[in-house]
Amino acid sequence: MKVALKVLTMFGMMFCLASSAALYASSELDGRIHEAKLVLSEIMVSPDQSIPEELLSKCKAIAIYPNVLKGGFIFGARFGKGVVLAKDDKTGQWGPVAFSTIGGGSWGLQIGGQMTDLIFVVMNERGMNGLLASKFTMGADASVAAGPVGRNSQAATDLSLQAGILSYSRSRGLFGGLALDGSVVTQDNNSNSIYYGKSVTSSDILMRNAVQVQPSSKELVDSLNEYTTHWAKRVGK
């Protein structure tokens, strides 16, 4: 009896620890989505300094990485966690989130450290395919250009034809020599499975309609739909 009681107690403790870990992981993912929503809202609040709504209307997908940590002395490194969302080509509506990480190193005259919010607007199939690869290197697997801001429609149209991915950043702190090329984007399929409660990949989520928009990501999806709709209304579509 004593042995059986010890075994039951041990399994009970293991179950409690596993449950606590799962709850923590789920809470962290909800927080990541909330931070992405805040970053998007704060960048879009100023019409003259925001991502052009035309780009959000024409793009394939968007990736948002809040609080990417970058620091170094001569050598630099960066790491961050974020979310990716794709837009349905037929309906124009944004779909559920997939999770992703960004990391990499760089070389150059750089010193210090900072937290940077990054947004990548994916404009074409090559950029989309790269983003869905197991590992995608910015600048090598698809061209990346600094995105236009405000209402510059002509610049938005030109860049959407030239670059696979348009990048936006908002930095806090001190850093010199920011270099985006060489950053590696990796799909976080472990987080995908935790968040949706089943084994699912980023490709399943973004391209195959394998899951539905969850309550904790609805606010972010609704915001993207709203920005996209603004442009359609402006041009009378």
Image: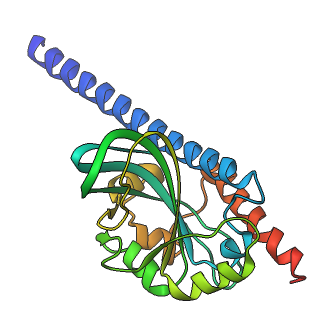
Residue 11 spot, x, y in % from top left: 22, 26
Most extreme residue toward the front, as rendered? Answer: 109
Most extreme residue toward the left, as rendered? Answer: 3
Q: Is residue 217 left or right of residue 152?
A: left
Residue 121 spot, x, y in % from top left: 55, 70
Please name whichever residue, 117 or 15, is drawn nearer the observer in this view of the structure.
117
Residue 189 found in image quarter:
bottom left
* Number of marks drawn: 0
Q: Residue at x 62, y 74 (%)?
A: 87
Residue 7 found in image quarter:
top left
Residue 3 found in image quarter:
top left
Residue 29 spot, x, y in % from top left: 47, 44
Q: Quadrant of the N terminus?
A: top left
Q: Is residue 93 above or below residue 44?
A: below
Please name whichever residue, 22 or 101, is drawn nearer the observer in this view of the structure.
101
Q: Is residue 222 left or right of residue 158?
A: right
Please name whichever residue, 209 or 157, is drawn nearer the observer in this view of the structure.
157
Q: Quadrant of the C terminus?
A: bottom right
Q: Residue at x 26, y 22 (%)?
A: 13
Task: Specify whether residue 66 is in view.
Answer: no
Task: Specify whether residue 195 is in view.
Answer: yes
Q: Is residue 2 above or below residue 206?
A: above
- Asked which colour scheme the image uses, the reply is rainbow
Q: Is residue 77 above or below residue 129?
A: above
Residue 38 spot, x, y in % from top left: 63, 44
Q: Residue at x 37, y 28 (%)?
A: 20
